[in-house]
Amino acid sequence: MRKLTLFILLASALLGCRFTAYAGNDRKPRRAQRDTTVYSDTYLDTVNVNRVFVLNDYMMIGFEAGVSFNRMQFNPPYSQGWRFTPEYYELTFTRYGKLFGYMPYFGLKFGVAYGHEGYKMEMNEETGYIGRISGATECVYDVAEVQTMAHFHFDVNHFKLMADVGPYGGKRLKIERIGEYVDEDIRYAFLDSDKRFDYGLKGGVGFALVFDPVELHFNAKVRYSWSNLYAPDYRSQYYYSFAYPFDLMVTAGLHFQISRKTGKTHGMLRREAKQIVFGEEKE
């Protein structure tokens, strides 16, 4: 009888210790366990795997070339048309980021550009008169500029919509006055009254075909200068004259991604591996 009682007490003590050990383990955070489940090839063939489109904050450099259509905002007004000028070039660096920290539609674009400004006078139908400035009925300026643009975009797998807007500053490098009444001494020369520093607002819209890591961009841009072509009182100190360039540019170009555009980066993979090994929760 004593042996039976002693056996019952010993068994109860062992069961109590084991229960306490399990209860203590439940209070500790459990480490992630590796899934060792084995699936058959037949089952795996039926699984539909969808690729998740994850857009990263990435960087890109690009080169664009195109043409421009130039005219002026004159005061007093002149009858004029658009002047077609080839040779517009642009080199840009784009840094993509998340708007307000979570909306992946924003970026900053920095670049340099070489293009043209100008005008082309036409006959006024009412007066039969063709306007002239310093004897010229046409004029073209070569302009180099630096720009800083806010960049907005919407991406899908192989297509992107874009919009840019921002200020620019530059310099008018060369001038050519065209017309039979132009004095040869000033045909290719700036006058003391001419303003060579250029600045204003630039913007545009476009789309891109994306084949990582290369993107083919097509853009239509508008450039509005806030810098008058000449001193407003060069003709008269009583009647001011103004001429502000207004230009349209159409371009196409190649851009190259210099960091990963989509998918999981090395940093993302390292964080996921750490979570699997140590069982840490996502921040």
Image (tube, helix red, strand yellow):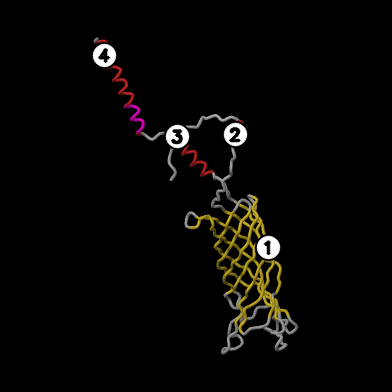
Q: Check residue 24 for magenta coloring.
A: yes
Nearer the N terminus, badge 1 or badge 4? 4
In whole angstroms, how far apart are the C-alphas of marks 3 and 1? 54 Å
- Tell me the SS state at disc 3: loop
Say which of 190 and 53 sits in front: 53
- Tell me the SS state at disc 4: helix
Q: Check residue 3 for magenta coloring.
A: no
Say which of 182 and 53 sits in front: 53
Report the disc number at residue 6. 4
Residue that mark 3 sits on: 32
Residue type of the residue flagged with mark 1? Ala
- Tell me the SS state at disc 2: helix
Q: Residue 88: where, in percent of width, then height? A: 67, 66
Residue type of the residue flagged with mark 4? Leu
Nearer the N terminus, badge 2 or badge 4? 4
Identify the residue at image location x=54%, y=52%.
57
In whole angstroms, how far apart are the C-alphas of marks 1 and 4? 96 Å
Nearer the N terminus, badge 3 or badge 1? 3
Does the residue at mark 3 contact the one at mark 1 (Cβ under 8 Å)? no
In whole angstroms, how far apart are the C-alphas of marks 2 and 3? 24 Å
The residue furthest left is 2
Nearer the N terminus, badge 1 or badge 2? 2
Residue that mark 2 sits on: 44
Residue type of the residue flagged with mark 3? Ala
Identify the residue at image location x=52%, y=30%.
37
Q: Residues within 10 Å of mark 4 (few under 14, many from 20)?
A: few
Q: Residue 274: where, in percent of width, then height? A: 47, 39
Q: Nearer the viewer, mark 1 or mark 4?
A: 4
Q: Nearer the viewer, mark 3 or mark 1?
A: 3
Residue that mark 1 sits on: 65
In whole angstroms, how far apart are the C-alphas of marks 1 and 2? 50 Å
Q: Quadrant location of residue 234?
A: bottom right
